[in-house]
Image (spheres, grey):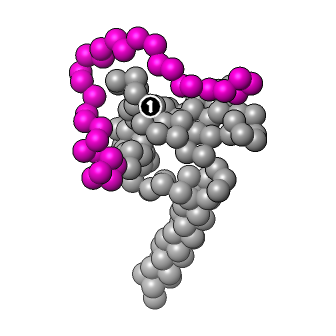
Amino acid sequence: MRWLKSLVIVLGFLIVGGVVLLAYGFVKKTQDPDWRLSDLFRDTPRAAAEKTPAPPPAPASVAAANPAPTPTPQPFGDVNLGLDTGCVVTDVAPAGDRAYLTIGPPGPCHRVIVVYIAAGRVLGTIRPGR
């Protein structure tokens, strides 16, 4: 009978520990959706490298038009964006080998220009509107 009491006590502690671990996991998942319990047992540089998202693959037509950048950047001189008077670059968002330039102010100037950084070429312009 004594061993049965000990078994119930040990199992009770396991249940309480499991509930605490489950609650901790829920809290960490709400803070970081990519978090895993196994991250606790890894060294931080490797765990941080695994969390770095890979860039999405480019469609085949875009990948064929834009070869991979050369290992040593080549100078490309000046790039003329052809902005109208009063239009300015309001934001720059780099993404891999491209830069997305937001042009403003809103109105006829409003657009996004996609630049291939390695060659300094303007790939295209995205205009909101009809």
- Residue at 62%, 35% (x, y): give it: 102
Instruction: Confirm whether the magenta stretch covers residue 66.
Output: yes
In the rendered image, the quadrant that contains the C terminus is bottom right
Span highlighted in magenta in the image: 58-87
Whole-percent x and y of residue 39? 42, 49
Residue 47, can we see it?
Answer: no
Closer-to-camera residue (73/87): 87
Q: Say if residue 66 shows up in the picture.
A: yes
113 in the magenta segment: no
Residue 18: percent from left, percent from top: 51, 69
Left or right of residue 39: residue 62? left
Q: Residue furthest toward the bottom? A: 1
Give the overall secondary structure of the magenta segment: loop
Residue 108 pos. (x, y %): 72, 40
Q: Is residue 18 above or below residue 110?
A: below
Left or right, 42 with reference to 30: left
> Which residue is denoted by mark 1 in the rendering?
122
Q: Residue at x 51, y 20 (%)?
A: 80
What residue is drawn where x is 25% and y is 36%? Answer: 67
Location of residue 115 by image quarter: top left
Q: Identify which residue, 12 or 124, lies in the foreground.
A: 124
- Res. 52 image quadrant: top left
